[in-house]
Amino acid sequence: MSQALDIKVPDIGDFKDVEVIEILVKPGDTVAAEQSLITVESDKASMEIPSPMAGVLRELRVKLGDRISTGSPLALIEPAAGAAAMATCCRALQAGASSSPRSTSTNTASPPSPPPAPAT
């Protein structure tokens, strides 16, 4: 059994203290990557907050009416089998590795040569 990962509210833009208006999953549910977990509403818009990975929802750390912001605790998810690489990536992002600059190298390889013309 994998260790459950602490999932936090992703970047939701300039919105702070948005209200949880709908809970779409419950503990024990199997969730898919990008499946919506909750719906939040600000004075300007409502948005669904997705799961960053596939797995089993072990604990939901919000309830209806709670106010959340980017980085607020959201859930504990046990990664699905085969999602170990994703789990490692999520741990690194949650540990602050995402704040380091990313390489923007470009592919300098030349495109493949066209096939030779058929003999006539």
Image (tube, rainbow, N blue to C red):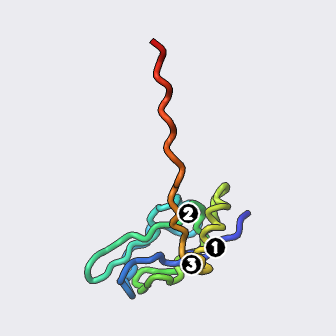
- Which residue matches tag 1? 91
| Chain-order first, disc 3 or disc 2 | 2
Graded by Cα atoms within 10 Å as few (under 14), some (14 to 19) or many (20 or more), the crowding at tag 1 reads: some
**Residue 44 image offset from top left, x and y in percent:** 26, 80
> What count of labels does the image hold?
3
Residue found at the very far top of the displayed protein = 120
Separation of marks 1 and 2 at Cα, in angstroms: 12 Å
Between 89 and 63, the one nearer to me in the picture: 89
Residue receiving disc 2: 53
**Please, which residue is most extreme toward the front here?**
120
Amino acid at dot 1: Arg
The mark nearer the N terminus, 1 or 2, is 2
Query: Residue at 67% of width from left, 61% of height from top?
Result: 84
Q: Residue, x 37% and y 83% (percent of image)? A: 19
- Residue 40 in the image, given as x and y percentages of width and height: 37, 76
Where does label 3 land, which residue?
100
Q: Nearer the viewer, residue 109 or 36?
A: 109
Which of pointers 3 and 1 lies earlier in the amino acid sequence?
Answer: 1
88, above or below 114, in the image: below
Q: Amino acid at mark 2?
A: Met
Residue 46 in percent (x, y) is at: 31, 74
Which residue corresponds to the image point at 59% horizontal and 80% vertical from the top-left?
A: 96
Picture quarter containing residue 17? bottom left
The reply, left or right, for residue 115 in relation to residue 19 is right
Q: Residues within 10 Å of mark 3 (few under 14, many from 20)?
A: few
